[in-house]
Amino acid sequence: MPKNSKVVKRELDDEVIESVKDLLSNEDSADDAFKKSELIVDVQEEKDLEVEEGSEVEDERPAWNSKLQYILAQVGFSVGLGNVWRFPYLCQKNGGGAYLLPYFILLLVIGIPLFFLELSVGQRIRRGSIGVWNYISPKLGGIGFASCVVCYFVALYYNVIIGWTLFYFSQSFQQPLPWDQCPLVKNASHTLIEPECEKSSATTYYWYREALNISSSISESGGLNWKMTVCLLAAWVMVCLAMIKGIQSSGKIMYFSSLFPYVVLICFLIRALLLNGSIDGIRHMFTPKLEIMLEPTVWREAATQVFFALGLGFGGVIAFSSYNKRDNNCHFDAVLVSFINFFTSVLATLVVFAVLGFKANVVNEKCIAQNSEMIIKFLKMGNISQDIIPHHINLSHVTAEDYHLVYDIIQKVKEEEFSVLHLNSCQIKDELNKAVQGTGLAFIAFTEAMTHFPASPFWSVMFFLMLINLGLGSMFGTIEGIITPIVDTFKVRKEILTVICCLLAFCIGLIFVQRSGNYFVTMFDDYSATLPLLIVVILENIAVSFVYGIDKFIEDLKDMLGFAPSRYYYYMWKYISPLMLLSLLIASIVNMGLSPPGYNAWIEEKASEEFLSYPMWGMVVCISLMVLAILPVPVVFIVRRCNLIDDSSGNLASVTYKRGRVLKEPVNLEGDDASLIHGKISSEMSSPNFGKNIYRKQSGSPTLDTAPNGRYGIGYLMADMPDMPDMPESDL
């Protein structure tokens, strides 16, 4: 290397702001010949410089301390609460073991290819979602902004769920657990069980009345729930402290937040398998209902679950992968993380149904005991003849098999009068068929099952600590999907932005900790993410496959990975995935249109849920959430298509290069690519067109080979300079 190579390196690393005009204006005024000449950059020398100097381009961006830390971050982001309380519900609802087949097929067709695509563009361009899609096509830069908006909407209510979990975690250090029994109330004469609790159950009452203190409708605010407000504040403080230093702080926390849930799930599975009735739950879970698998709804819900399970479209995947080295094997990462996510869902499903099988047996035993007492009363009253009861059966201590035998006999003998007796068949499968999902699974069904566990406070602490870790892992990726693109684009300090982001989110999140807050969580969950994220991912697929060019992208991957990815991905990205995503979008819109917009309200007088439609202002909010989430896409397209922002104003439309990587994208896409460096005067120079192949050979440069995006973003355009053969590197 020449002795002044470090000087060359330092100067090449300096930012060139606004346009090539500024680059040329920074040269000495006497160097007119330089301004009229072509720029030479020796690619081989540039690469050698990287090797010798440790690739300062890589160093100037934070990087993961190890590959394990990065994998754990991606696993922590993709494996979240949905794996524990959404996947088991869908598996139960849509055919048990038969649901796993469509899910696995769609994981291969939609999940892994699109996950690989997001990992690739993030690692290749080394920017957050805004910078990545600006690089692909400035007109499509709104995709990145839309991802940030959706991420923020999701973060607002997702952290509320973590707040709920923190509350239950804090209440778990009691024996017995506070949701174990219904509370007693006193009136003038005697003590009785709380009527609302008696009509429902102890865990249901605790969730709706003690934890949420919920109102009867979304229109009835009821004021702030101070307990949940404190928990929400604690949740945002935890997220802020973990993210304030970027991956330097959050990466280390990933070792615990990503691995601890697996320890708890395995412990729960071992413990649950030792409980009476757990096998009944697992058997019910994996008993395939093949006829259900042929229904279109099953495939739609499986595709949606694959889509959200991997965190596609949020920007978190792109943000995390942008801190990787350029030669990292992101294909291996995509397959590994996708399968870890799948097997985690299966593991969580085993745990959930083992516990629910135990709970079903407990409930079934109570049912048999109550109905046996009713049969004894009917025998004493003469409603049922003692002769029909087999002599070997003792109704005071009856087994499940004996009870079912007696039940069948009475049903046959008292065929016409049987309905008057109001006897229950007490079948375990009836209890297991009661589909429970979301908060109902975590805060009602699971908490009730744990009250029957030996040492129930210990298992409750472990369970909610696991949920906290699952939630935080996903929150880190969600917040990274907001912070990284904004820091890359606007060059603000990460620490300040993180604090402002979390503080603003807490203030907005106060609407979720009102007494009616649970209804707003449902609203945001239904309308702020599903359709906008689908549209974002469709546009991402189109941007890479058709705007940037699938052949060019495959060449980029070959250059980056050192090998050509399977042709399978070519056909997936270009044909199959876009068609599948469009079909999913249409199906989701149709389903949303057919399903009346509303929510399940808790009616105190009835002690049960009742479906209510949103009021008019609620409908406006629902529509506004979807519109606001996707609005950046057309706005940025129109602004840049019509050149409404001057590219010399230092705003979003300006161009900034750092060793050839675009930081801010140009609006002016006119002109030939070669004119970036060739002999036009500076005032005539136009910004490069990134939608076309900027690596084609330049006229008059027969020795220049086409470089598939090289090692740096758009790369430098290179040409021979016969007029200035001896120009020193320091002048360059």
Image (spheres, rainbow, N blue to C red):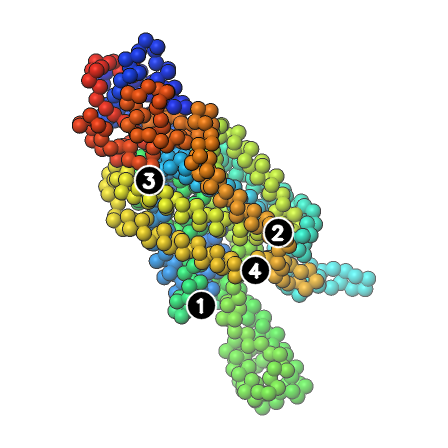
Q: Which residue is mark 4?
A: 596
The residue shown at (36%, 51%) is 578
Tell me the residue that label 1 is attached to. Answer: 284
Q: Identify the mark nearer the N-term, 3 or 1.
A: 1
* Residues packed near mark 2 inside 10 Å, few (<14), some (14 to 19) or many (20 plus): some
Q: Amino acid at mark 2?
A: Gly
Q: Along the horizontal axis of the image, is 673 left or right of 601?
A: left
Q: Secondary structure at mark 2?
A: helix
Given this view, does label 4 or label 1 mark the residue nearer the observer?
A: 4
Name the residue tied to disc 3. Answer: 548
Which residue corresponds to the image point at 42% horizontal and 51% vertical from the top-left? 307
Q: CA distance from mark 3 to mark 1?
A: 48 Å
Disc 1 element: helix
Amino acid type at circle 3 is Tyr
Q: Residues within 10 Å of mark 1 (few under 14, many from 20)?
A: some
* Above/below status of 582 relative to 18: below
Q: Residue 450, position in %: x, y?
A: 55, 58
The residue positioned 53% from the left and 43% from the top of the image is 628
- Distance CA(mark 3)–CA(mark 2): 40 Å
